[in-house]
Image (cartoon, helix red, strand yellow):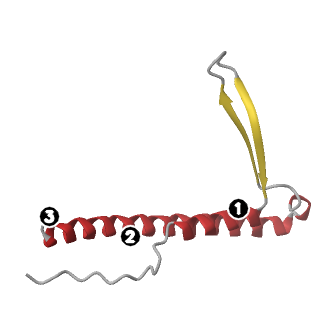
Amino acid sequence: MEFLKIFEIYSSKMTQIYLFQRAMQEIAKKELQKLYEYEESLKDRPELKEMSSSHHSMFFRSAKDGEHRFFGSKKSSIEDRRLAVVLHKNKKKPAGSRWGMVRPSG
């Protein structure tokens, strides 16, 4: 394969990575803002602060009888959710995050 073709493929894939990164940063920013606003709203209602801010129950449908089967649950505090957003955002960020892309001349 010709060098310029390889570089075009590489550049295209890098562009896609950066677009995903931008999208994830925007999503994370919005989610962190919502968590901050929720946490601020609890200042007026301290009795709610000890409650989990998120509760997830996990089920799957049994292939044998079609019934739902419970297999776990997770309660999350605001801090747990904030940490999850940050960790997920950082997972989507390419190492170095400021790669310079220079097109070859010719």
Q: Quadrant of residue 96?
A: bottom left
Mark 3 or mark 1, which has the lower sequence index? 3
| SS state under label 3 | loop
Say whether residue 95 is left or right of residue 41: left
Quadrant where the C terminus is found in the figure: bottom left
Tell me the mark number nearer the camera, choosing from 2 and 3. Answer: 3
Q: Nearer the viewer, residue 62 or 55?
A: 62
At 70% from the left and 61% from the top, the residue drawn is 81
Residue type indicated by callout 2 = Tyr
Residue type indicated by callout 3 = Met
> Which residue position holds label 1?
81
> Which residue, as the protein is rendered here, is positioned at the far top?
65
Tell me the mark number nearer the camera, choosing from 1 and 2. Answer: 2
Residue 1 point in image, percent of width and height? 14, 64
Mark 1 or mark 2, which has the lower sequence index? 2
From mark 3 to mark 1, how far is it between C-alphas? Answer: 46 Å
Residue 9 point in image, percent of width and height? 23, 65
> Which residue position holds label 2?
18
